[in-house]
Image (cartoon, coloured by chain):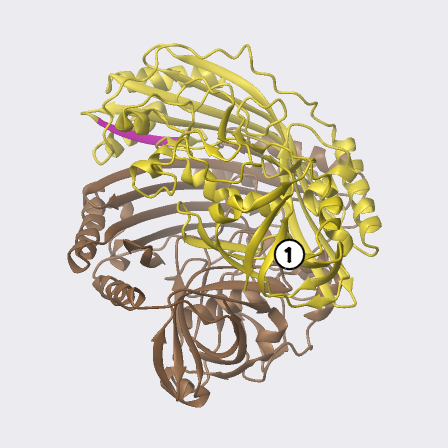
Amino acid sequence: MRAIERARKILETLGQVSSQSEVNWLVRRRNTLLAGSASPVFGSGTITSYSVRIQRNGRAGTAGSEGGSHPSIIAENAISSARTGPDFMWDLPSDSPSTAHFVNRGTLPESGEVLSFVGELASCADAAFPGTLLSARVSWGKDGVGIINSQGCVGEYLRNRVRVDATVSSATEEGLYRRSSHFECTCLPDPSTALQWLFPALSFAGARPETVVGRKLVLFAPPALGVLLQAVRTGVSGRVLLDGASWLAGKTGECVLSPLLTIREMPLHENGASSAPFDSEGMATSNKALFRNGVFKGFVFDLASGFEAGLPSTGNAGKNLGGHPMPVCTNITVDTGNGGSLEEMAGRIGSGVLVSGILSAEGSDAAGGGMILDCGTAWSISGGEVTGRLANCLISCSAYEILKNVCEVGSVQHRTGTDLLPCVTAEDVRIR
Amino acid sequence: MQENRDRAERAVQASEADFVEVRLESISTLELAQIGRRGFSVGPVLREGCTVRALVSGRWGYSWSSGFNCIEALVDRAAGAAVAAGKGSVSFTVGSPERNSFVPGSTEPFTGTPLKDKTFLCRHYCELLGMTNPGASARVDYSEVLRDRVVVNSAGTSVREVEELCGLRMQTALPGNVTASRSIARRGGLENLRHREELVREMTEDLSMRTNSSGPTPGDVPAVLGPELTGMLVHEAFGHLAESDILGQCPALAALVSPGRSVGSECLSITDDPTHFTLPGSCSWDDEGTRGTRTSLVRGGVVKSRLHTLSTASDTGVPPAGNARAWGTGSTPMARMRCTLLEPGEGDRDSLLTSMENGVYLKGCLGGATDMERFSLIAESGWTVRRGRIDRPMGPVVITGNVFDVLKAIDRVGGDIQLFGNMGGCGRAGESAIPVSYGGPHILVTAIRIG
């Protein structure tokens, strides 16, 4: 039975107990390759899941199923959940979203191509720093995503997804160098590009240990910038705004970041791994600037948070299996500047630090941007050259403060996670 | 599940592959949250799926699917993937095949408890937090996981284990980002979550202390670490280094932690033990069907053993101890920790503080990470210590450093061991987090980097 047919059956069952209900489905078809020091291992599989939400006595109930739960069991679970669910006082959409404008480019690779890709990626890693060993897990396939609700809204689309998780390890004179990273997109890039996305500073692995403290000019490589942008992802959420926890409350229209920064949410990006023509509630998505030249343009909402705020949904509902929708961002991109490549940007720094990866980012004030970054992969720069590897580099900061102090933006975007980001240089960053 | 188990047994016996393993999983979850006066639930969610791997001519092939409809087809598909991969060199032996089931009993199983009782439990703690901390926000999250798992293989193993796991996370915050939290998770029923009012009292003390705290002065200092932080340090600083499949990808790393090598001071003895059956991560059998047994990883500062899957155990000629763990359909069993702990020595916190004289005292843990060479942990609370006495509060403190340096800097180990578990678990390499627990006694470290 096709997913949409099963979803219709579930919806019919829900219709017996609820005036408004919706069913989302996700069919994840994946091939995988594990490759490293041992023999390569191929696998394939399909996971089909259904999430439902019902309105019952003015409250929302949810349930989820991965596998073969009978529709009546899913309905029972949703009814049970509605007894303690949040308010549900608005109407689900009745219009079906258009998918005509949704272009998901990229060709999925064959197994042999993936095996070659990993081999070439390993060669590139060895060329960047001789003796480096690389292991990787690549998964690729299609997502079949859909929604149907009781008001007549129906939509479905297919999306390519390719995810590369890789780990490099090198024995250097200064000790072991081992790092892991990943990215997601819609097709395999060429291996040298992929290595730059994953490990932009691998060639410096043999640098001698140094210690740097004080306020510095810091060059953040895309994986590190991606961690800083977590605060932005949280802060622009309409739900966080309503909970009174967003640093951006009351700042719409204000220049709160560096004028060099334009940050966008791009659900319709042709090569975005999180691209989608409609959100988890069936509302049409759109590409939008979250910050244009540093100016905050506004929060993102789902139906529930929009209803509470007296505003329409911005098409940003996302949810986990069986969960309630929340306002979320899909692919985040930062517009390029004229700073050139990472090497060119580093070459203009007289004295500073390059942060190419974050070991951990802890912050009890994520929405406010406050965090402590333990920079697992950081380097000292002197006279435009990387001169040392920082053994312990802690940055205690507000992510917004760092983004406000950005003084240069690179001209090459890298994929990191599902985002597309350049390098940025920020002034006056306090290294502890 | 029994009917599907029978089908899986027939399917693996019918296969012509050199080795076939079928893992059937049914995982049902429920989450409740009480945020101030507002409560809501997520789920229930039921996940059912089948994961198969087959070994043919020295190469593995995998297949998986949600639901249990196509076990037989998945066996064929996994064997096909292995054949397509060509010839390889993978070989291993399965010890004595196990045929057994373990369905634990609990005093108050959550499966039979009405939703309103669980909601009431959350509301009770949330109201208590609100009453004892006027002006502070309060949030209590409840999670439950019921995992029914069958592992069947062509060597004759057929085991089934039901894991009942539930937990609470309590959080409170005053304006100005002064926060406190506690987490608890146990295998078993709701009886483990009742009468935990002492957690609210501890959080109230934390809030009061943090309101008057100033941040730490960064630098390398002597420190006494509390039991939870000790456990997390052992987990991050050595536990991941003992995972054999990671070491197989990195010979340089494997050489640093090879059996017989000294990695720490003589008072350092680390064990991974799945037999603490009230804690997350405990198991009768792992996800390859191997019985879970206690593993001594480090004894007197010297590496004794590693964590193994069937494959890595065969490669190194040691018996597997049940560390191959996977979570969810399509995931691959990897060598992972279960309950990792630092064995106790003698003495208590105060004797260690007296011994240290000046430095810091750190306790509680908000999270941790490692890249194998370095670790990073967040201590929930910290104080300066002057002349052996706790002095000025510092609030949350980051501790970081080289894993081998810190293991060598452990100077004294107390006797007051405690074990901990929460619903967060341990993630690795893009896989889902798996339940683990950890612990130890108070320890004295001669120098550790704080920030």
Residue at horizontal 63%, vertical 73%?
B404
Vertical comparison of A23 with A165: above or below: above
Q: Is residue B142 left or right of residue B295?
A: left
Q: Looking at numbered disc 1 in the image, what kind of residue is underneath it?
A: Leu
Vertical comparison of A329 with B107: above or below: above
Can you identify the residue that label 1 sits on?
B310
The answer to which image quadrant residue B269 occupies is bottom right
Q: Colour of chain B?
A: brown
Vertical comparison of A9 with B203: above or below: above
Residue at horizontal 37%, vertical 46%?
B146
Q: What stretch of residues is rendered in magenta?
A: A59-64
Residue B365, image x and y in percent? 42, 64
Label the magenta part by its dominant secondary structure: strand
Residue at horizontal 78%, vertical 64%?
A172
Residue A46, image x and y in percent? 56, 29
- Badge 1 marks a residue whose secondary structure is helix
| Within-10-Å neighbours for mark 1: few <14, some 14–19, many 20+ | many
Instruction: Decide if residue A37 is in sight here.
Output: no
Instruction: Decide if residue B199 is in sight here.
Output: yes
The answer to which image quadrant residue B241 occupies is bottom right
Residue at horizontal 24%, vertical 31%?
A82
Q: Colour of chain A?
A: yellow
